[in-house]
Image (spheres, rainbow, N blue to C red):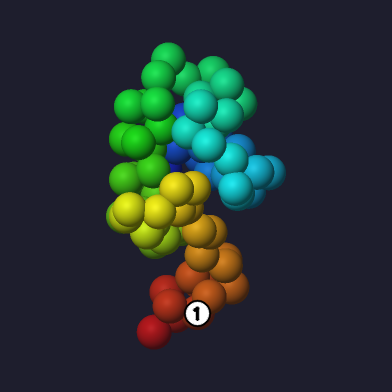
């Protein structure tokens, strides 16, 4: 799945600060609001690059790339 530039930018911000808040990622990526972060998080989750845990604060978890690549090989 090809990711848009802004989605890849958010992924890099998450890699740099996985325990960051939406507001921190807005600042890091230069987005206009946390709604933009939410939109791109959905794209990352659909691409199976992150997991999210509803109801938990700071609930974004990176999926290890080697595990992701192994899933692609099947």
The residue under the point 54% across, 18% down is: 30
Which residue does the image show at 45% across and 37% down from the upper left? 7
Placement of 60 over or under 3, stated as above or below? below
The residue indicated by pointer 1 is 70
Residue that lies at the very extreme toward the right in this rendered image: 16
Figure check: 41 above or below 32: below
- The residue most toward the top is 32
Q: Quadrant of residue 43?
A: top left
**Residue closest to the eye, 43 or 72:** 43
Which residue is rendered at x = 50% and y = 79% of the image?
Answer: 70
Element under label 1?
helix
Outermost residue to the bottom: 74
Q: Residue 47, relative to residue 3: is it above or below?
A: below
Report whether 51 appears left or right of 62. Answer: left
- At horizontal 50% and vertical 58% (from top left) the residue drawn is 61
The quarter of the picture where residue 28 lies is top right
**Residue 4 vs residue 62: left or right?**
left
What x and y, as percent, mark residue 48? Answer: 39, 61
Instruction: Out of 30 and 56, give the one closest to the viewer.
Output: 56
Confirm whether residue 68 shows in the render.
yes
């Amino acid at each position: 799945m090809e990711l848009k530039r802004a989605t890849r930018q958010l992924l890099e911000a998450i890699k740099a600060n996985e325990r960051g808040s939406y507001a921190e990622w807005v600042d890091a990526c230069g987005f206009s609001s946390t709604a933009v972060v939410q939109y791109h998080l959905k794209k990352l989750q659909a691409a199976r690059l992150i997991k999210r845990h509803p109801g938990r604060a700071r609930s974004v978890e990176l999926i290890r790339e080697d595990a992701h690549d192994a899933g692609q090989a099947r």
